[in-house]
Image (cartoon, rainbow, N blue to C red):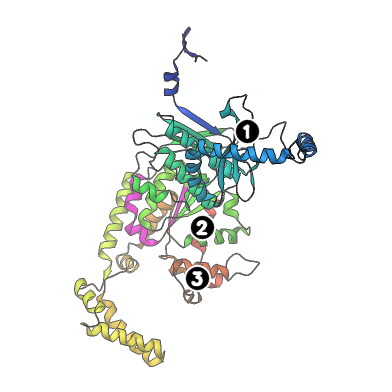
Amino acid sequence: KDLRLVYIDQKEWYVSWGLSKQIRDAFLTSAIISSFRDTPSQLRITNYSWYGRLLKKIWEDKRNSIDDIGVTIQEKLNEKFYEVQNISNQIFSDVASTIQETINISFKDTNISFQLTVDNKADIHKNTQIYVDDGFKSHIGDKGSGIQSAIIINLFSYYCYVFHKNTSLLIIEEPELYLHPQARRTLSEKLEDFINLRNDKENQVILITHSSEFISAGKNGNGITIVRKDDKATNANHYSFSDIDTKELQTILRNENNEMFFANKVILVEGAEKYLVPAIANHITCRSGILDEQNISVIRTGGKGDIYKYFKILHKCQIECYILADRDFFFNGLSNLLQIMQEISCEDKKNILAFAKEVDSKATRGYKDKKKIEERTTKPEQSTDAKALCDALDELDEYKSEETIQKLLSIWHYVRPKIKKKDVVGYMAETGSYSQFLEYRNILWLNNVFILEKGELEDYYTAEGRQVSGGKEEKVIHILRQVDPENSINLDYFIDLSEFQEFLQKILQ
């Protein structure tokens, strides 16, 4: 049929008639896959429907009827079905093999086939049905939503690549339904392949999802649209990431952290605090899972150098963000963050950075020739200091006697002062500038950046807590396992958690 385009310009109407097939085909091709991908109908053939029972009764009555040469109807049909199946396989071999290759990644040992029905009066191509054998061969409509989605997406991708030469659009709602996490990530990669299907043109994908696995689809930084509902209305806002460095964006858009785009508030931490913060929140509120109840995510950045990258994305997306960082972040990590924080005045930023730089540069203790010290302590075959230290450690490992421990400590007290060590607290105490640090720390906290006053997480452990083995994260996980059923955290492992409680109380208020 002719395509009619109608344009309205004030009070005048313009109508275009009879666009050619070539022009129509040049337009954007699109497919919309709704969240409910079942294919019900009034005449659904099952063992429980009236229509299914009717057909089954007719078939059972006729299947064993014998003709003049002693062949049953069932045997005749089996022979013809075999021939039709062979012909179907020849016709659809290319598309079947293409889809089969991709489907097997998520749905192993699953076979896809296209079958023609026997009605030759209608258009033959309209009688093609898709069957899926995942241990039980049946029509695609009888399979789960996950495999239906995968097949439809791959079919549309195949169509766009083979037949449609222009830009194509795929809109898919809730692609995660009935898919396990690994299959979701695989499907996300297939959507990425669809975007880059052709070298000269880029396809488009619009996802409506509640799953973090699909946030990384579209790694070129085109952005996301976040839909939020408040008491008054539902609002959708699009946020573009085209101005953000691609490598920074890929660092942030990791599956484990993409839940932050679904959060009302986000807490950024460097590492092991990711596990500790929720436990403390449960402890101070006496409620399990309080952060999840309030839609608050704790995101591990992996180090203070990446905190500002996450903050920049969250600020752009208008997601409320809080930062919990070690004291060292104040002296060696604030510069990039302050550049993008608009709430703090330029004068305060200038003063904070100048103070941090001065303390960091002047807080060195016992530093001599770093290169010479490294050579003497890391090459035991050339250094008597290093050899003595290694020998003492060997003895400690073997004997663990008090004499060996004292010997080790005496060597350590000789070697340690030669190595560069910063003591910012000692320097600020000597210069009377600690109060200034607290003043600047308070300015940051008013703008949701909380600096731990004592130092880092390890400085909050009791002697019992320090004895727990493992790295930073392993230690926290082990401590959290030692919990009485009535509590969310064992306070015997910590000197004082009041700072963490102050931080969380502001967020939870």
Task: Note whether residue 127 is visible.
Answer: yes
Q: Nearer the viewer, mark 3 or mark 1?
A: 1
Q: Which mark is residue 143?
A: none
Crowd band around label 3 with a 10 angstrom C-alpha radius: few (<14), some (14–19), many (20+): some
Comes first in the chain, label 2 or label 3: 3
Q: For the residue marked with disc 2, what is the amino acid?
A: Glu
Percent coordinates x, y for residue 398 in the rendering: 40, 89
CA gap, disc 3 and disc 1: 76 Å
Percent coordinates x, y for residue 76 in the rendering: 68, 38
CA gap, disc 2 and disc 1: 70 Å
Comes first in the chain, label 2 or label 1: 1
Q: Nearer the viewer, residue 60 or 227?
A: 60
Is 397 drawn above or below residue 263 in the view shown? below
* Residue at mark 1: 117
* Residue at mark 2: 502
Q: Which mark is residue 495?
A: 3
CA gap, disc 2 and disc 3: 15 Å
Q: Nearer the viewer, residue 353 or 55?
A: 55
Q: Which residues are magenta?
A: 321-342
Crowd band around label 2 with a 10 angstrom C-alpha radius: few (<14), some (14–19), many (20+): few
Residue drawn at x 63%, y 60% as measured from the top left? 286
Q: Is residue 261 magenta?
A: no
Disc 2 secondary structure class: helix
Disc 3 secondary structure class: loop
